[in-house]
Image: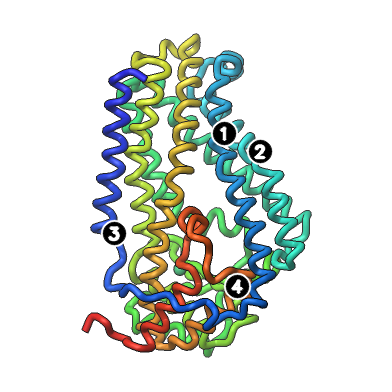
Amino acid sequence: MDRRALGIAGVAVAGAAGITALLRWRLWSHGVPSTPTPPVGDYFDAAELVRNREYRRGVWAMAAAAVPIAPAVAIAVACTSGRWAGPLARAAGGRPWRAGLLFGAALSLAGTLAALPLRGARYGWGREFGLITQDLPAWLVDVGKGAVIGAVISAAVASGAAVLIARAPRWWWAGLACGIAGFVYLSSLLTPVVIEPLFQRTKPLDDPVLARQIIELARKEGVPADRVLVNDASSRTVTANAYVSGLGASRRIVLYDTLLRDFPREQVLVVVAHELAHVKHRHVLKGTTWGALLAIPGCLLCFALVGARTGWGPSGAPGGAGTRVVLRRLAIVAATASVAGTAAAPLGNWVSRAYEREADWTALRSAQDPASQISLFQGFVRTSLGVPDTPRPVQLWFGTHPEPIERIGMAERYARDPDPAG
Ligand SMILES: [Zn+2]
């Protein structure tokens, strides 16, 4: 690797560390006390967890095996660009935007296909344990929809990247970072109205008593709860959950119909308080900002690798050999982004766990019902075949939420001392 590339890569890594430190300082959780973790045996019967552990061990093994698939595909594609870049450039009529479009769609579909056997195995595993209720044809339709959406997004991003690489040999990485940052915000805004309806049906909550309790809770937390929806999760799973998505006008709280079906009302209210806390603390916006800002050093790292492998000069005239060079560079960008994105998963989940802890603590303070919060987490472990104490490496890489026993510990702490700050 030449010295210039090493220097730029160093700036990218330092920039990522700086942005992480800045956001850890400015966009973190506040006022959440540290809590001791109670013994698992206080809340769970070891014999009851045997089946859960068996199920989870299979899930973790398959999740770990799936981690390197997308980077491996992207690296293989980049390493073989000498063979395919010429024919693809010709197929695109030498136009960078069209070449990028074809490349992005093909790479995304290749990744989906490579991951399909493991996804199928996970589906089968979930069916075997009775967690997944969706039948095979419906599951395949969802996989197909996901593949098409992935290919369309990947094609659009790659097309834009190809045009930037062709036109701005020194600054394409900055343009790409701006484009990706804009796209990250746009997708947070539009996902609830464009993507989610493709995979689930929702309807407004039609339980006047619960709706009144939710409005009361929302008033206490000082957040709007104008859109509380219920989805049809029971057609796919027996697990219960809820989530917040969207920004501003597209924001909504969605409760799984399984939650309303299988959990007592006090526990549903605890879940709602948790989701309202995400709204109150603007966690969707904050999480999106992490992604958007870290795209800048990510694109700079891509620039360093492209320079090291293909030189720093212009790609050449479009229509001829230039488009072939653009495609080679694009493949290096995709491989770098895939590796960096995969390696950043633990960082994203570290941020997610901090926001989940803040939402749990805020929910304890607003719902003021730690006993229900504890029963809720016990119920989640039971219905989703969860494990209250996830092994450390699994939790660090994949854990989007604190472990159930840790969340129970926080509720215990609140029950003992509701206001540790004052
Ligand atoms: Zn949450």
Residue at label 1?
Answer: 72
Task: Specify the amino acid type for callout 2.
Answer: Ala
Task: Specify the amino acid type for callout 4.
Answer: Ala
Of badges 1 and 2, the one in the foreground is: 1
Q: Position of residue 259 (x, y in %)?
A: 59, 77
Local secondary structure at mark 1: helix
Whether label 3 lies within 8 Å of ligand 1 gets the answer no
Q: Quadrant of residue 294?
A: top left
* Mark 4–mark 2 distance (CA, rounded to whole Å): 30 Å
Residue at label 4?
Answer: 240
Q: Position of residue 278 (x, y in %)?
A: 39, 69
Task: Specify the amino acid type for callout 3.
Answer: Leu
1 or 4: tag closer to the N-terminus: 1
Instruction: From the viewer's side, name the closer residue of 203 and 350.
Output: 350
In the image, residue 407 above or below residue 56: below
Residue at label 3?
Answer: 27
Dot 2 alpha-carbon crowd within 10 angstroms: few under 14, some 14 to 19, many 20 or more? some
In the image, residue 27 above or below residue 67: below
Residue at label 2?
Answer: 114
